[in-house]
Image (cartoon, helix red, strand yellow):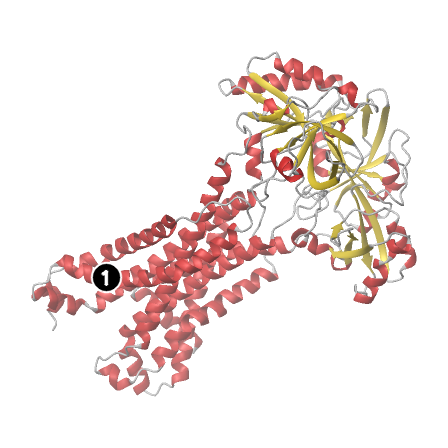
């Protein structure tokens, strides 16, 4: 019986190849898009699954209640907590700690120098986290503080294809230190690991140069992890007992939290600057919704076209019923036809997925591969059984209920069938219109953010990361000898200051007014030298620029000066802030000497906050160079030449020359929005294509069924264009209904998406008009292209057999 059903389904496809191809293509495109998103979503949801026993691993976080009652969470904790967890809690199998470091220069034995990102790890780290070992023994890092483990990527950069184990790397910082380290192992850093490093050193190696560390209180970039024993889970009672560990040390208003390892990538809601990259759960939900919409559009197409084509099979159903076929047999046959077509579509979709995966990886900046797995098998079963049954269910139940007498008389069921078809077509139009509106507002907001006046000049400014480099004066003067270089400044990063850190929202700053009253406000602290305002073309509203004398900074008796922005001036509510002294939480007194016009130093998601700028050479890590646009390449070559020349003189200087334009760094703030815009555009085009394929199929079937009507109308004097207008009017009514439904839905979704931004583009009326006109125009082209041929046909051909 099953073989017979499959044979009938294949015959049906072959008999009406064009119609079946349209039907299948909707399925294929929907399944391909859904499968690509399915692979991406699975990849996002399985970050950190590269470590053994990951379900039993938790990152420990600090929950501290501030004076105002606000609870702040941080992953930075003292190293000695790991030992306490191992010794005091029997349910804990193991615990470890890692301290994220900075970038330092190392030299191999052959003289090759590179800048390396360091981390410092506890003695249990490589037992706790199972990084794939390429060569060597990572546990040997504990034998000697000068033993190191490096990543396979760094090993290739330093030593090529040669073995890295036993090789020496030298770290030097002027005449102060000259340490030699031995590579004892090379490990792979999985792409989905939140822990990233190029070189891992023993925690005992931290504090080179004889610096004494109190490990009971030192928390800078230190993360602690615990692993529960097999069979143990982090129950509420256990978590509460373990959370009081810091309180037992005498710290008040502090509790510990336990974040599952697999939640770090997508579910971190606090400042986590040491982890390079976090995912975005809202983007995952958005893509899941888009995939579901598109796959259901394919299913709707199948249902719509199959239901519409049902009229051509009335006599077949009547003959089967007269010869004794039961309704359940007919339902089984029609469902099997849907599953056969779904199976064919799935095979084609898998092939198309494999072909489009490289392009998808480039667009999404990921490394997905189509491999045999249970998730792929489940998707295939869902595609064949789930979507096949869903798409074929209504035609099956509808056709099986046809009265055989009505079928032989040439009659048709009307009413509900027509209502379903119109409803499904309207749903497709609604989805397409909503996606067009969302795509439009995302692109409009991106254009707005990229072109909004930020209060500073963002073009033709080169940004170079230098780490801490005190002796920058000579390098600046050497660069300024080039007439194509208009300004040079050292500062903290201002394209997205404090993102992912506790510096983002600033800290309390106090001052005493002329009446002797003490007041305070939260201000963001920015660091820059005296050329900062000139280099970025900012406007000094009042006063003068702060002092940036390198020697005066180290003079403890010298009062440091600062410049504030207009927002800070307004927040202070004083007539003239010049000459006033402000004090930060760190107790550093600063005298205000100037006010600059407001400028954006964070992304457009944030309002401009009160801020003060002062010179602190211990916090300057980025060099900004304003260049003339006419000779850009020659100027960049000059900067690189001078950079490498000075790098040879200073061992603390970053060895690798790399740069970015400031405007490009600003655009990186909106990488998530760019990703969303690309995917929305893709799904919008796909939704329109699927909807128009459905319209094309329906029009083709409708003109075929109404051939006699068209012939009679032409005999009675109707012109071809009038017949075409009749069909167009019918489909434009559906577009109009969909437009009325889509507008409020789209407006709500657009408003909700824009709410993430402090600075928003307006939701313009022309977005709705443009979406409606585009949908109507594409629909008209589809309908006209299909009906004109039939309307122009000689009526004799239509009525010859009547």
- Pick whichever, 333 or 561, lies toward us: 561
Residue at which label 1 appears: 729
Q: Measuring 78% from the left and 56% from the top, which residue is drawn there?
A: 257
* 618 horizontally vs 382: left or right: right
The answer to whether any part of residue 123 appears in the image is yes
Q: Position of residue 250 (x, y in %)?
A: 90, 52
Q: Measuring 83% from the left and 54% from the top, which residue is drawn there?
A: 253
* 202 horizontally vs 261: left or right: right
The image quadrant where one finds the C terminus is bottom left
* 229 horizontally vs 717: left or right: right
Instruction: Classify 326 as above or below 266.
Output: below
Extreme residue in the front direction: 515
Q: Position of residue 190 (x, y in %)?
A: 69, 46
Q: Position of residue 360 (x, y in %)?
A: 51, 47
- Pick whichever, 746 or 525, lies toward us: 525
- Pick whichever, 544 or 357, lies toward us: 544
The answer to whether any part of residue 17 appears in the image is no
Q: Quadrant of residue 89?
A: bottom right
Instruction: Classify 473 as above or below 65.
Output: above
Instruction: Classify 793 as above or below 591.
Output: below
The residue carrying pointer 1 sits among few (fewer than 14), some (14 to 19) or many (20 or more) residues within 10 Å by Cα, namely some
- Pick whichever, 516 or 192, lies toward us: 516
Q: Position of residue 191 (x, y in %)?
A: 66, 46
Instruction: Classify 563 as above or below 74.
Output: above
Q: Quadrant of residue 122?
A: top right
Q: Measuring 44% from the left and 56% from the top, which residue is drawn there?
A: 747
Q: Secondary structure at mark 1?
A: helix
The image quadrant where one finds the N terminus is bottom left
């Amino acid at each position: 019986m099953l073989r017979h059903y499959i044979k009938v389904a294949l015959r049906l496809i072959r008999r009406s190849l064009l119609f079946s191809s349209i039907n299948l293509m909707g399925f294929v495109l929907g399944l391909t898009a859904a499968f690509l998103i399915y692979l991406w979503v699975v990849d996002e949801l399985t970050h950190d699954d590269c470590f053994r026993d990951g379900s039993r691993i938790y990152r420990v976080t600090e929950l501290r209640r501030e004076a105002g009652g606000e609870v702040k969470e941080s992953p930075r904790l003292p190293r000695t907590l790991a030992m306490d967890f191992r010794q005091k809690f029997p349910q804990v199998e193991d615990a470890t700690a890692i301290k994220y470091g900075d970038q330092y220069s190392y030299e191999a034995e052959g003289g090759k120098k590179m800048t390396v990102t360091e981390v410092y790890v506890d003695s249990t780290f490589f037992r706790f986290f199972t990084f794939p070992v390429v060569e060597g023994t990572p546990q040997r890092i504990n034998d000697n503080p000068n033993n190191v483990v490096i990543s396979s990527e760094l090993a290739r950069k330093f030593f090529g294809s040669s073995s890295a184990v036993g090789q020496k790397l030298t770290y030097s910082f002027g005449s102060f230190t000259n340490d030699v380290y031995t590579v004892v192992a090379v490990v792979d850093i999985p792409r989905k690991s939140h822990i990233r490093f190029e070189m891992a050193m023993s925690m005992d190696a931290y504090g080179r140069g004889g610096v004494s560390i109190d490990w009971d209180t030192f928390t800078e970039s230190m993360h602690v992890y615990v692993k529960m024993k097999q069979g143990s889970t982090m129950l509420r009672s256990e978590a509460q007992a373990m959370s009081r560990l810091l309180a037992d040390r005498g710290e008040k208003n502090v509790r510990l939290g336990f974040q599952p390892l697999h939640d770090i990538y997508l579910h971190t809601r606090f400042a986590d600057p040491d982890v390079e990259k976090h995912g975005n759960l809202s983007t995952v939900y958005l893509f899941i919704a888009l995939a579901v919409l598109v796959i259901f559009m394919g299913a709707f197409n199948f249902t719509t076209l199959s239901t519409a084509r049902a009229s051509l099979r009335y006599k077949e159903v009547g003959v089967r019923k007269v010869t004794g076929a039961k309704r359940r047999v007919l339902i089984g046959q029609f469902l099997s036809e849907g599953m056969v077509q779904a199976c064919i579509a799935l095979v084609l979709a898998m092939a198309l997925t494999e072909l489009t995966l490289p392009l998808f990886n480039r667009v999404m900046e990921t490394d997905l591969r189509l491999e045999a797995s249970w998730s792929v098998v489940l998707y295939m079963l869902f595609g064949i059984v789930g979507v096949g049954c869903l798409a074929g269910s209504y035609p099956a139940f509808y056709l099986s209920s046809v009265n055989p007498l009505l079928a032989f008389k040439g009659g048709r069921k009307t009413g509900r069938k027509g209502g379903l078809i119109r409803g499904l077509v309207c749903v497709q139009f609604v989805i397409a219109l909503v996606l067009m509106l969302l795509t439009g507002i995302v692109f409009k907001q991106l254009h707005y953010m990229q072109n909004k006046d930020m209060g500073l000049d963002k073009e033709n400014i080169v940004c170079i990361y230098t780490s801490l480099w005190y002796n920058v004066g000579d390098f600046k003067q050497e660069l300024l000898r080039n007439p194509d270089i208009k300004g040079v400044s050292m500062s903290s990063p201002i394209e997205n200051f404090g993102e992912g850190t506790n510096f983002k929202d600033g800290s309390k700053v106090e001052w005493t007014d002329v009446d002797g009253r003490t007041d305070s406000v939260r201000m963001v602290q920015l660091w820059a030298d005296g050329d900062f305002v000139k280099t970025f073309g900012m406007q000094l509203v009042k006063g003068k620029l702060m002092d940036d004398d390198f020697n005066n900074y180290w003079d403890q008796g010298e009062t440091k000066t600062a410049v504030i922005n207009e927002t800070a001036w307004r927040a202070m509510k004083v007539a003239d802030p010049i000459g006033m002294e402000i004090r930060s939480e760190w107790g550093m007194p600063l005298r205000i000497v100037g006010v600059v016009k407001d400028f954006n130093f964070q992304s457009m998601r944030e309002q401009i906050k009160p801020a003060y700028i002062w010179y602190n050479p211990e916090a300057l890590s980025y060099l900004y160079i304003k260049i003339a646009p006419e000779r850009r390449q020659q100027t960049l070559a000059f900067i690189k030449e001078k950079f490498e020349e000075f790098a040879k003189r200073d061992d603390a200087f970053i060895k690798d020359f790399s740069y970015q334009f400031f405007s490009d760094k600003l655009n990186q703030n909106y990488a998530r929005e760019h990703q969303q815009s690309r995917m929305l555009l893709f799904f919008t085009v796909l939704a329109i294509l699927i909807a128009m394929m459905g319209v094309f199929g329906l029009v083709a079937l409708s003109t075929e069924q109404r051939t006699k009507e068209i012939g009679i109308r032409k005999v009675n004097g109707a012109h071809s264009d009038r017949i075409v207008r009749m069909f167009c009017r019918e489909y434009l009514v559906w577009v109009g209904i969909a437009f009325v439904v889509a507008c409020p839905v789209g407006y709500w979704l657009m408003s909700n998406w824009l709410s993430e931004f402090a600075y928003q583009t307006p939701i313009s009326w022309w977005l709705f008009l443009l979406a409606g006109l585009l949908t109507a125009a594409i629909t008209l082209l589809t309908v006209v292209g299909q009906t004109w041929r039939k309307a122009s046909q000689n009526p004799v051909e239509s009525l010859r057999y009547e």
